[in-house]
Image (cartoon, rainbow, N blue to C red):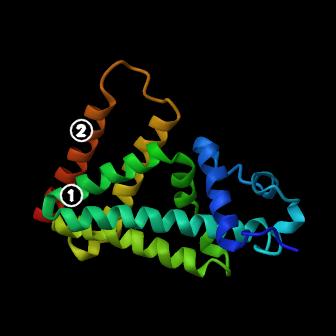
Amino acid sequence: MPRAGLDRAAVVALALTVVDEGGPTGFADLTLSAVAARAGVAVPSLYKHVAGLPALRREVALACIDDFGRALAAVRAERSGAELLPGMARAIRDLARRVPGRYQAVQGAAWVHDPDAVAVREASVRVIGHIGDAVTALGVPDERRIDAIRAVRAAVHGFVVLELEGGFGMPDDVDVSFDFLVAGLVGGLERLSAS
């Protein structure tokens, strides 16, 4: 008999807690054993609510991607034009610093070939759409939109990962460096739109 109060949503919430407690590798290190221990049940009891670790990872990734999308949508609601991309870049960095394990879950690419990950792929497309709106607001031509989205994602993600892993050891202010990166992205994309 399932533990009282334990259902699919509760198992996902417990998994998210495990991910949060695991720091930057929280998603990669997610196990059914860790979730079961947090729930106070044996691992087989979780199978009443989720179809194993791959299914749980999909549920967790979907929740994280949805949160990520809401953060970008909030920026979109408050900013426009040339302020949209810097706002989104800061939101991405803030989220990654606040919940690095969830950020890691958003970045996974395994879903592309997983036939059971339709909802995860659809949520990811919505997130990319927000970033696409930010590059479009800078006047990036349609034929370069994908290139611009990839450049933004690569630059911001690279910075965030280096920061999370302690890769910026010099005493200079990391916030200033991040603003420099974002200003360079905006300026480069604006120049692209003018050419």
* Front residue of 91 and 150: 91
* Image disc number at residue 42: none
Task: Specify the quadrant of the image occupied by residue 176.
Answer: top left
Q: Secondary structure at mark 1?
A: helix
* Residue at the top extreme of this rendering: 171
State the image coordinates of residue 33 (x, y, percent, origin top left): 82, 54
Residue drawn where x is 64% and y is 71% of the image: 9
State the image coordinates of residue 71 (x, y, percent, origin top left): 36, 61
- Disc with the residue nearer the chain's start (2 vs 1): 2
Residue beneath disc 1: 189
Drawn side of residue 179 relative to residue 99, left or right? left
- How dense is the environment of label 1, judged by Cα within 10 Å: few (below 14), some, or many (20 and up)? many
Residue beneath disc 2: 180
Drawn side of residue 24 relative to residue 31, left or right? left
- Quadrant containing the C terminus is bottom left
* Residue at the left extreme of this rendering: 194
* Front residue of 24 and 184: 24
Q: Is residue 84 above or below residue 22?
A: below
- Quadrant containing the N terminus is bottom right
Task: Specify the quadrant of the image occupied by residue 43.
Answer: bottom right
Residue drawn where x is 23% and y is 68% of the image: 77
Q: Secondary structure at mark 2?
A: helix
State the image coordinates of residue 167 (x, y, percent, origin top left): 48, 30
